[in-house]
Image: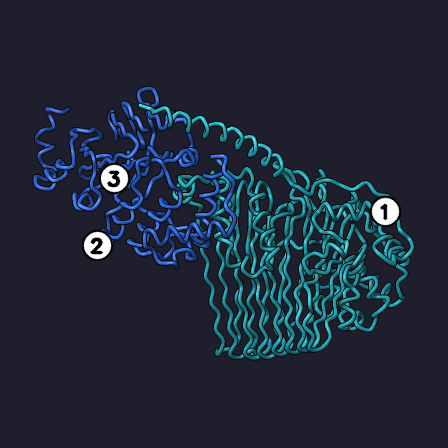
Amino acid sequence: MLEVKNLNVSVDGNKILNGIDFTVKAGEVHAIMGPNGSGKSTFAQTLAGHSAYDVDEEKSSVSFLGQDLLEMPPEERARLGLFLAFQYPVEIPGISNSYFLKAAVNEIRTSRGLEELDAMDFADLLKEKMELINVDPSFADRFVNFGFSGGEKKRNEILQLAMMEPRLAILDETDSGLDIDALRIVSEGINKLRTENRAFIVVTHYQRLLDHIVPDFVHVLHKGRIVKSGGKELALELEEKGYDWLREEEPATA
Amino acid sequence: MVSPSEKLETAKYEGSRVEQSNQRAAEAADREYKHGWSTDIDSETIPVGLNEDVIRLISSKKEEPEWLLEWRLKAYAGWKRLNGEEPTWAKVNYTKPDFQAISYYSAPKEKKELKSLDEVDPEILATFEKLGIPLNEQKRLSGVAVDAVFDSVSVITTHKDILAKRGIIFCSMSEAIRDHPELVKKYMGSIVPQGDNFYAALNSAVFTDGSFVYIPKNTKCPMDLSTYFRINQENTGQFERTLIIADEGSQVNYLEGCTAPMRDENQLHAAVVEIVALKGATVRYSTVQNWYAGDADGKGGIYNFVTKRGRCDDNARISWTQVETGSAVTWKYPSCILKGDNSVGEFYSVALTNNHQQADTGTKMIHLGKNTKSTVISKTISAGKSDSSYRGLIQVMPKATNSRSYTQCDSLLIGNKCGAHTFPYINVRNHSSSVEHEASTSKISEDQLFYCQSRGICQEDAISLVVNGFCKEVFDHLPMEFAVEASNLLSLSLEGSVG
């Protein structure tokens, strides 16, 4: 589904990602871990198409569902089925969540040759998804992320994920800023959205999220490279040892 | 690594994307100024130029009473004394109109009085139909009565009979002068005096038509009233006058829309609107202004120099809502004179400028009565190389004790070649009143756009989404259909604002 080859990315001339190779198949859950500044969020935002990240297009290639992802503006990536749950969801005052979601869902539907949902059908779908992932009905009428608490913002991202039904969902530090209860609720929501067709990339700093969302693969990112990959037990190992050992092993991997 | 089923799905996506991009291209072409066409119609247009004879000619063509001709001539004398000195305090820059190069009267040739819609020139009916304003009463515009003004004259007013049953008068200004002279004489010029300002004086001398509304005591107007202004003829100006009288305890909603063909020359629109809200009356006046704004290089477009003012007696309320997206230059300050105790004035405004458009707009709230209240919400959006200013006066007079005023001015900038300015004037002359003023300026953020894009919404739609959100407080005060139209207009006007 997703194939990343030798991804090289810089921001304002500073190299952040130094050749990432990474493959995701349908139904898989990949966790990307690593210390602060290792390039985790850059990786997530680059896949979604943020223009602040300069991809070295000569070296890098990213194919998603057989298409060249790097060629596409962000909205086309989304329409193709890529979703990014933001670490810092953005506020849009004056626009209700339901209006925003309706616009998004219908963009995606039209791009797939489906008819737009009318107001009634959309309301039904929204209600169903809100119940599924257990968010308060008031979310529909509130302005997009405006005045939301940190936890509410993250849950709103998961609601959007549920509505947009992507093929690949990238969760960028969805656990940051959540207390234990909120973390559990958000994780339950995500687990309900796991399907055979849908893959997840879970970017996180801490192992605790992975207690709830059990990954198939864990990758450790350090200085813009994947320095170690393994199964879910790798996350536990990291929890125990911290990230310091990376610095010791650094000369060997570099 | 791509499975066969994935390949199939991908192909499907790709096909529909091509379709969609075709559709988008078609939409984009469609998004130019939609109302830029003109109607080929046999018009009677008097030669350009302005002098006393021209005013006499207009007056005689309209078969006006003597008192009105004198009124006009007095206004003209006052205007002449100003010696061509237009107001210069607004933050706008434009080539002054040549007042001798304008024709002050242009009317579709149709001498006899129209008894019914069947007698209206089909070309004109088609024109309004094309603008989305069906005048045919069978296609009743969701319960809205319309006065259609084409160049200098009102061509038809719909639903008159239904309204007349309740004693409501809704007709063209010309008819009102003929049929209700006592009301016109009493109120015309009572709110905006002939010599009020340069353009009001000009309008008073040469106005040709407009709408007239009278709502009787304790009557709630059963439908929204609206006037649609269309400038068609070349080298003409439109100088209409609207007078709304809401008698004691009455209520009315009034809507105004305007468009003009795309022409390379600037055309002048100098209107006067007067509202009289007697004791306990409520008048809501909404405008969606979409005059031709000129092309992307700033060539052509309407000069929109308008004086709008209302007076509130005791316990009365006047609420102005305006969405200004068109015109090359806008100079407009719908105001309220809060004369009566406990009266309320409101001003809700969205002004959007793009390309080379300029707008200097705002309001004046003059508190004279006790316990008077005013609210001003202004949203200014500047894109392209445009320049937009809010200019507002809050004046609280010594006897206006315990009055309150709240102003909120927000500006949103799109790109880095545009400007937004706020010029608040506050003058409070007693100690028991309170005046609040809040202002903010922000730029549309990259993060907001990326967020929308990552949800499948393209950049242009994302901008219009954010702008619509920014304007919500004002749109909430518009009637439903107008709010939809306003929101669509914003998207159109923002076309090409991202580089």
Instruction: Name the kind of residue labelled 3 in the image.
Output: Val
Name the residue carrying label 1: B45
Relative vertical location of residue A133 with respect to residue B184 in this rendering, above or below: above
Mark 3 → mark 2, Cα distance in angstroms = 18 Å
Instruction: Name the kind of residue labelled 2 in the image.
Output: Asp
Name the residue carrying label 2: A179
Relative vertical location of residue A187 with respect to residue A169 in this rendering, above or below: below
User: Image point 46% across, 28% down: which residue?
Assistant: B12
Q: Nearer the viewer, mark 1 or mark 3?
A: 3
Sort mark 2 into few (<14), some (14-19) or many (20+) by Cα contacts within 10 Å. Answer: few
Q: Quadrant of residue B391?
A: bottom right
Q: Can residue B81 be seen?
A: no
Instruction: Name the kind of residue labelled 1 in the image.
Output: Thr
User: Which shade of the palette goes to chain A?
Assistant: blue
What kind of element bears circle 1?
Answer: strand
Q: Nearer the viewer, residue B159 or A190?
A: A190
User: Which shade of the palette goes to chain B?
Assistant: cyan
User: Image point 41% across, 35% down: which residue?
Assistant: A74
Q: Nearer the viewer, mark 2 or mark 1?
A: 2
Whichever of callouts 3 and 2 sits on the residue coming sooner in the sequence is 2
User: Image point 15% across, 24% down: which residue?
Assistant: A254
Rendering colour mode: by chain
Image location (x, y in percent) of residue B397: 57, 75
Name the residue carrying label 3: A202
Relative vertical location of residue A4 with respect to residue B41 in this rendering, above or below: above
